[in-house]
Amino acid sequence: MKFYSTNNPSSRVSFKEAVIKSFPADKGLYFPEEVPELDFLFLETLDHYSLPEIGNEVLRQFTSDDIPAEKLQEIVHDALNFEIPVVEVEKDIHTLELFHGPTYAFKDVGARFLARCLGYFNESENNEVTILVATSGDTGGAVASGFYDVPGVNVVILYPSGKVSDLQEKQLTTLGKNIRALEVKGNFDDCQAMVKQAFLDDEINAKLNLSSANSINIARWLPQSIYYFEAYKQLKDKRKLVFSVPSGNYGNITAGMLAKKMGLEIERFVAASNANDIIPRYLKDGKFEVKPTVATLSNAMDVSDPSNHPRMLELHEKAFKDIIDHVSGFSLNDEETLSVMKACYDTNGYILDPHGAIGYASLKGQLKKKETGVFLETAHYSKFMSTVEQALDQKIDMPDFVGDLMAKEKVATLIDNDYEKFKAYLLD
Ligand SMILES: *Cc1c(COP(=O)(O)O)cnc(C)c1O
């Protein structure tokens, strides 16, 4: 299977090249040259397969030219080594809990698969790869944890000092081994700018083999389709399935659309957004109008120009009519998010994180009779404890796993927001 650029369908690369390059030089996104339909029998008997077995069946369609069957099995079993359960929250409304991985957010799935693919592709090379990531909180943790102890790969994470939550900081700074954390005296944009400059720096490129773990990397996107199959498998009532996906960059929801295109019986999707509601607005009138990003309580969804929009178009043969037949939008502001968290807790005893809350409310707002609803719970609520306590108006006990992490010692190098110092650090 080859992958083309959404900006130029005639340029094709292998899976390996798409993974290593992350995105084409023409700034498009890699997209599979054909979307394979899964075997009917496999789809009919999903409940005979474990999560990694489903993952293997889905991913081998795309990777078999570049990763031998046995190796893929090993990678997938390693990457998907945690549960992704469906839990009923109330009648007809279920949640797919994507937060049982090491950093308690769905990004673990993609980051772990990408890390293992890069590790494998690098086995035959002699020089080590250095992954540079700037993070505003969540992504860095998933990437760091995903690459932890992967041979031949070093990770340097830049994060803005004082601007990530305590739990997020611990996730970035307590791993050790091949993961190094740089605490930058600046904001996220400063971190991002230094990373971008490093990629363009000849001196650095002469000495280090740099790579990025960008969220649009095909190896982060493809495995996210796996858990839609897993959800289908676990549901008792599978009729007219509607998935509501809390969205920012739209990687997660478009991976669901990919699963549908591969043959999974999904009725439709709800694009659940916060005040950064470009897609819900787009779905009303077809205008893709970027507005400035606003900061919200569901900060992982604070994206004003979602980079996966081209993949949404490809998945629907660029037909807007087809998109609106299968996707509807819904958005909530912060006040509504808080009141939904409270209402769901009061009625169902289920604690939502602010992102999941948007998925839940969007589903409730749009579910029709005879449809079965599933919203994706994209992060564990403990990552957003102050918002949870504000919403529920009470003190909530930290789960045990959080205590264990908080007790670990932070190891980070504090550096100025100064490119030359960063460069000296990298070349040292
Ligand atoms: C990244 C993230 C999202 C948004 O996912 P996209 O694939 O960018 O749409 C939603 N919730 C949480 C908790 C996230 O970390």
Image (cartoon, grey):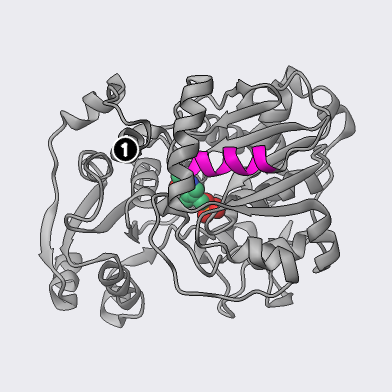
The residue labelled by disc 1 is: 390
Position of residue 17 relative to residue 197, above or below, is: above
Front residue of this view, candidates 88 and 364: 364
* Image quarter (top left, top right, bottom left or bottom right) of the C terminus: bottom left
Q: Residue 376: where, in percent of width, then height? A: 58, 37
Name the amino acid type tagged 1.
Answer: Gln
Between 251 and 40, which is closer to the camera in this rendering?
Answer: 251
Q: Main secondary structure of the magenta part?
A: helix
Q: Callout 1: few (<14), some (14-19), or many (20+) C-alpha neighbours within 10 Å?
A: few
Query: Residue shown at 59%/80% (left/top)?
Result: 26
Where's residue 185, x and y in %?
14, 65
Up-down relation of residue 148 to residue 183 (above or below): above
Residue 78 visible (yes or no): yes
Which residue occupies the foreground of this view, 351 or 188?
Answer: 351
On the picture, is 48 further left or further right than 191? right
Name the residue located 84 percent from the left edge and 60 percent from the top edge. Answer: 322
Q: Quadrant of residue 422?
A: bottom left
Residue 67 visible, this angle:
no
**Which residue is depicted at the point 49% across and 57% down?**
215
Magenta highlight range? 355-365
